[in-house]
Image (cartoon, rainbow, N blue to C red):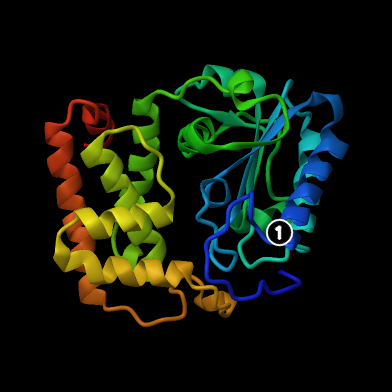
Amino acid sequence: MFRAIVPMMDRPQSWYNCDEMICQYIIGLVDLFKGNLGNNLVGIYLHGSLAMGSYFPPKSDIDIIAVVDKRLAPDLAREVNRKIAQYSNKRPTVGNIECSIITLETAQSIPDEMPYELHFSETWYQRIIDDQVVYGNRQVDSDLPAHLMTIKKRGICLYGKSIDEVFGEVKWQSFMAAILDDFNWLVEDENICESPFYCILNICRVLQALTENNQKSLSKYEGAVWGIENLPHEYAPVIEKALAVYSSNIVIEENKRRTGGVEWDKTALIAFRDYAKSEKDRVMQEDEVTNFGKKLYI
């Protein structure tokens, strides 16, 4: 799917110091949006690891939210999504594009259920290319409140109106509901064994949000550092391993990306999963803010 391999590095990247080929690729993506959305385009905003200075090309995605003034006609949404999918084939990184287009009304009002005009990610690629995505119907994404919270706190405007002009305030409860929804998948069945480093790093940053309730938005890298410093020491080795795998710039085969190409101790993974479940339940019983989440998920 990708044309070139990013050289090994010894540092995480941010938008302000990323490799030139990554910068130029994102500028090309911005031009794609500008060329196809014209005057309807309000702005393009970077969030996720590249905005937060924790970007590693073999693992991290390029996270983008584009905002339009008016809803997209179905045919235009289909055309733009296919062009994004085709452009993703030219990326100079292993990590792919993950982007959504939302309306200005949605960005400013932040409804409890957040609709989107189109979405692209690696898992959607084949459906988009095969024209199996339905456009024009109202579709919502439970992850959007978390993405918009990151934009408000740490995002970068790549084009258009400023973040403060475009995005309303995301309620902390909406953010918590979004990340708890993801958390439920992280600790479900043996998902942690299938995607170890992804689950571990995300579990850490959810636990930080739950236990500290200081309304921070951490990257996966920052979440792992917090977990090593704040969670019981017996879980430090598995978190350290997840962080090392995530931050490694060694390029591995596509079919080994979910494990990072290394062996994992299943007993240690299950133990951390079970600890995370119990810690989440404990905090939700005690913390006033996350009682909102308790009503939704228990």
Q: Quick one: label 1, few (<14), some, or many (20+) residues within 10 Å?
A: some
Question: Relative to 110, does residue 197 appear above or below in the rendering?
Answer: below
Q: Is residue 256 visible?
A: yes
Q: Nearer the viewer, residue 3 or 281?
A: 3
Q: Quadrant of the N terminus?
A: bottom right
Query: Under tag 1, what secondary structure?
Result: helix
Relative placement, left or right, of 281 versus 255 is left
Question: Relative to 273, does residue 215 appear above or below in the rendering?
Answer: above
Residue at coordinates 64% horizontally, 49% vertically from top-left?
Answer: 16
Q: Amino acid at mark 1?
A: Ile
Q: Nearer the viewer, residue 247 or 87?
A: 247
Total number of numbered discs in the rendering? 1
Relative placement, left or right, of 291 versus 67 is left
Q: Nearer the viewer, residue 239 or 112?
A: 239
* Mark 1 lies on residue: 22
Residue at coordinates 15% horizontally, 67% vertically from top-left?
Answer: 234
Q: Quadrant of the C terminus?
A: top left
Residue 61, image x, y percentages: 58, 56
Q: Quadrant of residue 33?
A: top right
Residue at coordinates 76% horizontally, 63% vertically from top-left?
Answer: 89
Residue 99, image x, y percentages: 64, 44
Residue at coordinates 87% horizontally, 38% vertically from top-left?
Answer: 35
